C-alpha cells in the first residue's frame, strides 16, 4: 500500500500476483486524478496479448499482433488474396482481404480466420463491423473459439430480388473487430 502527496509523481505501488494458480485480481484501484486508475498488464515487459490501459476514459489495447492465419473458399468462390491485419491484437483491429469477381452464388462462401496471440479462457464475444460496401454480399462470424475467429462472406439464399448476378467487382473487404471475454 502506498500514498502519494499532491506534489509527488510516479507509481503509488506495485502489486504482483506470482502464483499461477491464484485467480484473484492483482489490484483494485480508484483515482481522483486525471491518470488511469489501473494500468493492467498480464505478463512481463508489456509483451502480453492482454495488456490493457484505461486512459482519460479511453480504452487502449496493447500487446503482440494477432494475425490472419488462414483463408479458405468453397467451390466456385473466387480466391482470397492479400489477407492482412492492420493494428490487430487480441482486443481490436482491422482485417482486410481481397476477393475476385466470380462465384458469388449460394451456397459458395469465403472464410478468413484470425488467430489470437494468446488464448482466451473461454470463447469471447466478437463484434464485427464492415468498413466497405458489401456489394450485396452477406457476412457473419462463422466460428469463435478461444484461439481465434472466422469471418465468412457469402451470398445469402434469402437475399431479396432472387435474380442477383453471380459477379461483383473485385472487392477489398475491410472489417473492424472488437473482442471481449
Image (spheres, rainbow, N blue to C red):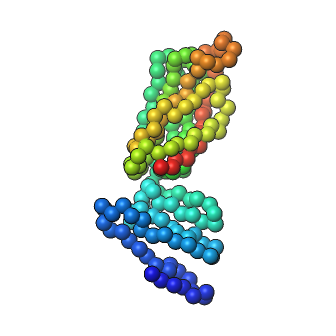
- Residue 150 location (% of width, % of height): 47, 35
Q: Is residue 138 visible?
A: yes
The residue at 47%/60% (across/down) is 51
- Residue 8 location (% of width, % of height): 57, 86
Viewer-proximal residue, 61 or 173?
61
Viewer-proximal residue, 112 or 161?
161
- Residue 134 location (% of width, % of height): 64, 29
Task: Locate residue 153: give its quadrant.
Answer: top right
> Does residue 68 appear left or right of residue 36 in this picture?
left
Q: Which residue reaches farthest right?
A: 161
> Does residue 172 appear left or right of residue 17 in this picture?
right
- Residue 129 location (% of width, % of height): 61, 39
The residue at 57%/64% (across/down) is 54
**In what quadrant of the picture does the N terminus appear?**
bottom left
Q: Is residue 115 visible?
A: no
Q: Which residue reaches farthest front?
A: 24
Amino acid at each position: 500500500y502506498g500514498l502519494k502527496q499532491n506534489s509527488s509523481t510516479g507509481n503509488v505501488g506495485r502489486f504482483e500476483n506470482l502464483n499461477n494458480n491464484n485467480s484473484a485480481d492483482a489490484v483494485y484501484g480508484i483515482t481522483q486524478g486525471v491518470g488511469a486508475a489501473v494500468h493492467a498488464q498480464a505478463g512481463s515487459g508489456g509483451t502480453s496479448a492482454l495488456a490493457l490501459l484505461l486512459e482519460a476514459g479511453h480504452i487502449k489495447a496493447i500487446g503482440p499482433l494477432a494475425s490472419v492465419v488462414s483463408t479458405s473458399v468453397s467451390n466456385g468462390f473466387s480466391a482470397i488474396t492479400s489477407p492482412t491485419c492492420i493494428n490487430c491484437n487480441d482486443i481490436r483491429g482491422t482485417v482486410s482481404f481481397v476477393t475476385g469477381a466470380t462465384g458469388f452464388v449460394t451456397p459458395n462462401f469465403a472464410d478468413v480466420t484470425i488467430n489470437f496471440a494468446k488464448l482466451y479462457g473461454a470463447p469471447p464475444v466478437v463484434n464485427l463491423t464492415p468498413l466497405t460496401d458489401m456489394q450485396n454480399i452477406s457476412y457473419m462470424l462463422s466460428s469463435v473459439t478461444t484461439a481465434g475467429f472466422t469471418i465468412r462472406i457469402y451470398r445469402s439464399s434469402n437475399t431479396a430480388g432472387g435474380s442477383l448476378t453471380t459477379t461483383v467487382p473485385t472487392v477489398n473487404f475491410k472489417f473492424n473487430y472488437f473482442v471481449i471475454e
